[in-house]
């Protein structure tokens, strides 16, 4: 195991690659992005918008996938206000919401004046599949994530809205199997957020293919027929989550700090993915498996954007990244009707003992791993 010497990302993240200087490729990608000619990219985006604007007469001319988060505000601003498109917002409903998230979602539609189409997944099916995915994959919200990726594309085909707007290219910016910089979001499903697991693994007498329609991708033939063109906006305009949050706040978006609703433990910020209570239990599971989760990811972004030094990031990661927010976990366990003791047994099953150890009753990075995090480079046994 090794740590990037520039940011705080470890190579235990699936598909993560380091160069010969022990620098991770998202850090290299960030350097590359800084040299981008954004004027040319913006022209490319304008040309795309020109091509699709009015393609359906007075009907919508593009789709924005959104949850009401800070990035949704920026996406909607760019497409509707800057490029004069008539977008339809498509979203997959959270299984449980924060009040702040509700406010942000309602305010997004009111502030920008847009229609939204929401798919609310069958809660019974979600509970069933979340439980199975927790126990078998250690990725509890597999089905929900799959629907988030598949459902908008499915609808884009049905509604003849080939231009589908996504925010950031997480593979290129955070690390994953698809590392080349590309405007197309077509390969997004293979970005490892949703593990490639066939439906057969989950289906039985209790859940059948009839129950999982929102999680199905359009077929190759359907994609070809409408010439589906999903794009990452982060290819065309400079992308910075913190700046997007600042922009969104000028349009009525509220952070958890603004509302005081909840101070999340195990987080570096209180503005990203704040619409759902239990959802990020899924993300926390990276810690027992790979020894890092949200704090490492966000701190690494902050370092790359010059908002934090590496040593500040190290301290934040050591202090926070292992923590599982109690309210988040309780909400998730209530939703799937799961006992906390059983949940911790599952965590123990997935815990990578090469990286973490139990200290004071908590899974923490091993001391030699913490030492490598501090210096960057390889973990010494
Ligand atoms: Zn790095």
Image (cartoon, rainbow, N blue to C red):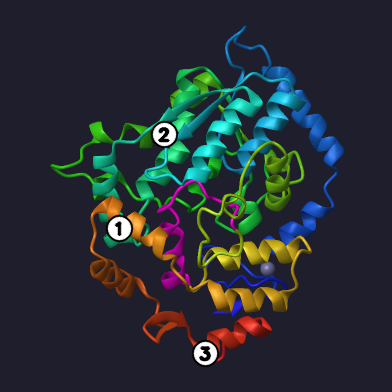
Q: CA distance from mark 2 to mark 1?
A: 29 Å
Q: Looking at the image, which residue is at 41% across and 58% down?
A: 282
In magenta, the rendered stretch is 270-290
Q: Secondary structure at mark 1?
A: helix
In the rendered view, would you say 236 is above or below 164?
below
Looking at this rendering, what residue extends furthest in the front direction? 260
The label on residue 370 is none
Dot 3 corresponds to which residue?
367
Residue 88 appears anywhere in the view: yes
Dot 2 corresponds to which residue?
217
Q: Secondary structure at mark 3?
A: helix
- Horizontal and vertical percent for residue 214? 36, 33
- Horizontal and vertical percent for residue 363? 41, 79
Q: Nearer the viewer, mark 1 or mark 3?
A: 1
Among the two numbered marks 2 and 3 on one chain, the one whose residue lies closer to the N terminus = 2
- Horizontal and vertical percent for residue 248? 68, 41
Closest to the observer, 251 or 291: 251
Residue 179 appears anywhere in the view: no
Q: Residues within 10 Å of mark 3 (few under 14, many from 20)?
A: few
Q: CA distance from mark 2 to mark 3?
A: 44 Å
């Amino acid at each position: 195991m090794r740590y990037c010497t520039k940011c705080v990302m470890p190579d235990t993240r699936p598909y993560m690659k380091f160069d010969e200087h022990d620098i991770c490729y998202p850090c290299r990608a960030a350097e590359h992005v800084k040299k981008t000619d954004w004027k040319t990219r913006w022209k490319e985006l304008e040309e795309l918008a020109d091509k699709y604007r009015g393609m359906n007469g007075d009907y919508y001319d593009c789709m924005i996938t959104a949850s009401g988060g800070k990035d949704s505000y920026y996406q909607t601003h760019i497409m509707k206000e800057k490029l004069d498109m008539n977008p339809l917002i498509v979203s997959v409903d959270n299984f449980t919401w924060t009040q702040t998230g509700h406010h942000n979602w309602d305010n997004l539609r009111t502030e920008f004046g847009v229609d939204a189409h929401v798919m609310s997944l069958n809660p019974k099916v979600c509970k069933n599949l979340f439980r199975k995915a927790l126990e078998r994959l250690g990725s509890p919200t597999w089905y929900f994530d799959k629907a988030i990726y598949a459902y908008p594309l499915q609808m884009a085909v049905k509604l003849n809205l080939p231009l589908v707007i996504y925010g950031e290219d997480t593979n290129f910016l955070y690390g994953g199997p698809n590392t080349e910089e590309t405007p197309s979001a077509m390969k997004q499903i293979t970005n490892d957020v949703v593990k490639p697991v066939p439906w057969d693994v989950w289906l039985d007498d209790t859940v059948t293919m009839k129950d999982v329609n929102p999680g199905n991708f359009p077929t190759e033939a359907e994609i070809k027929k409408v010439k589906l063109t999903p794009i990452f906006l982060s290819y065309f305009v400079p992308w910075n989550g913190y700046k997007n949050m600042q922009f969104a706040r000028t349009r009525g978006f509220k952070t958890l700090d603004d509302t005081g609703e909840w101070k999340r433990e195990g987080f570096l910020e209180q503005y990203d993915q704040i619409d759902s209570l239990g959802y990020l239990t899924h993300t926390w599971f990276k810690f027992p498996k790979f020894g890092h989760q949200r704090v490492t990811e966000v701190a690494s972004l902050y370092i790359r954007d010059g908002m934090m030094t590496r040593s500040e990031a190290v301290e934040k990661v050591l202090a926070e990244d292992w923590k599982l927010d109690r309210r988040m976990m309780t909400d998730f366990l209530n939703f799937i009707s799961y006992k906390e003791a059983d949940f911790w047994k599952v965590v123990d099953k997935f815990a990578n003992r090469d990286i973490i150890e139990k200290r004071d009753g908590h899974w923490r990075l091993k001391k030699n791993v913490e030492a490598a995090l501090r210096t960057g480079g390889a973990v010494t046994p």
